[in-house]
Image (cartoon, helix red, strand yellow):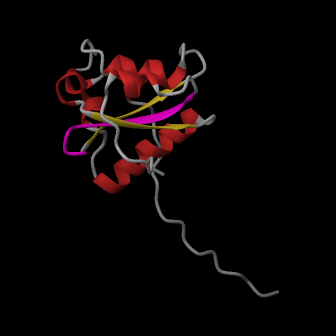
Amino acid sequence: MPIRKPWILPTPETIRAIPAVVGVYEIADAEGNLLYIGQAGGREPFGLRTRIGLHFGGDDPNPVLRERAAQFRWEANQQYTTKRLEMLMQFQRDEGAEWPPAHSAGDWRDTPQLGRLRRSQQIGRSSG
């Protein structure tokens, strides 16, 4: 469920190359440690390009992103809200942490109510 693309260094050229589409994105520190899982919806002017660009503009209100954000990756996805929630739930399951570091430092809008991912159990078939 995480984005399976290489990390991109934020430069004016790489930010401008992001299409104006809706979707999800991840931001990491220089070592590749995930800091934030975000989304760009239909009300965001220029979609992912705008949202990601705001994080690397030098005045992000989130102190973790302002100080540690070093790379990003994105995925166009029409189901961006659901995809982001799935990514956050997988982070919780795989990392054993409640939230990525920048979510904990953010405001309430960065902490949606999540379910829990777990393996489904095989359902036995009854004969008859």
* Residue farthest to the left, as pictured: 67
Q: Is residue 69 visible?
A: yes
Quarter of the C terminus within the rendering: bottom right
Residue 107 visible here: no
- For the point 24% across and 35% down, the residue is 101
Q: Nearer the viewer, residue 6 or 115?
A: 6
Q: Looking at this rendering, what residue extends furthest in the right direction?
A: 128
Q: In the orientation shown, which residue stands out farthest toward the bottom?
A: 127
Q: Nearer the viewer, residue 4 or 17?
A: 17
Give the x, y percent position of residue 122.
59, 75
The magenta segment is 22-32
Where is residue 109? Give x, y as percent.
41, 22
The answer to which of 37 and 19 lies nearer the viewer is 19
Q: Is residue 49 above or below residue 122?
A: above
The residue at the point 44 percent across, 51 percent down is 4
Displayed quadrant of residue 65: top left
Tell me if 47 is positioned left or right of 6 in this view.
right
What residue is drawn where x is 43% and y is 48%?
Answer: 5
At 43% from the left and 46% from the top, the residue drawn is 89
11 within the magenta span: no
- Position of residue 111 in the picture relative to residue 120 (left or right): left
Name which quarter of the figure residue 14 lies in.
Answer: top left
For residue 10, what is the image quadrant? top left
Q: Position of residue 49 (x, y in %)?
A: 47, 22
| Residue 25 x/y as whole percent | 43, 35
Of the pair 10 and 103, the residue shown nearer to us = 10
Please say whether residue 26 is one of the residues in the magenta stretch. Answer: yes
